[in-house]
Amino acid sequence: ETNVFKVRGFDELLRDLADANPVEFPDPALEVLALSRQSVN
C-alpha cells in the first residue's frame, strides 16, 4: 500500500514535468508511463 502512494507521487511528478516541458520524453520508459497515465485519465 505504500507503493500506491509512491506511484501516486510519481504520477504527480510526471504531470508536473509534462506541464512544465510539453515535449516528448527522451526516455522510452517515461514515455510509456506518460501514455499509460493519459489512457487512465
Image (cartoon, helix red, strand yellow):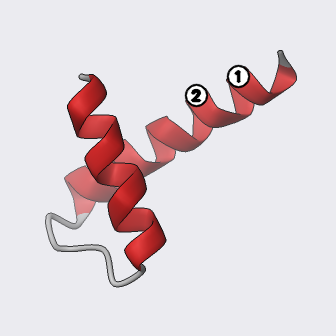
Mark 2 residue type: Arg
Question: In what quadrant of the picture does the C terminus appear?
Answer: top left
Residue at image position (72%, 34%) is 6
Q: Residue 10, how many percent across, how many down?
A: 57, 43
Is disc 1 in contact with disc 2, using a CB cutoff of under 8 Å? yes
At a point 16% along the width and 72% down the height, the residue shown is: 23
Say if 27 sits above or below 15 in the image.
below
Distance Cα–Cα, label 1 vs label 2: 6 Å
Q: For numbered disc 1, what is the local secondary structure?
A: helix
Picture coordinates of residue 40 (x, y %)? Answer: 29, 25
Of residues 35 and 23, the one nearer the viewer is 35
Q: Going by the picture, which residue comes out furthest to the right?
A: 2
Q: Is the residue 24 above or below the residue 31 in the image?
A: below
Q: Secondary structure at mark 2?
A: helix
Instruction: Identify the residue at image location x=42%, y=80%.
Output: 27
For the N terminus, the quadrant is top right
* Residue visible at 63% across and 34% down in the picture: 7
In front here: 35 or 10?
35
Callout 1 amino acid: Val
Placement of 33 over or under 2, stated as above or below: below
What residue would you read off at disc 2? 8
Residue 24, given in percent of the width and then of the height, sits at: 20, 74
Q: Quadrant of residue 31?
A: bottom left
How many marks overall?
2
Q: Residues within 10 Å of mark 1 (few under 14, many from 20)?
A: few
Q: Position of residue 4 (x, y in %)?
A: 70, 22
| Residue 3 horizontal side relative to residue 37, left or right | right
Hey, which residue is sitting farthest bottom in the picture?
Answer: 26
In which quarter of the view is residue 9 placed? top right
Q: Which residue is mark 1?
A: 4
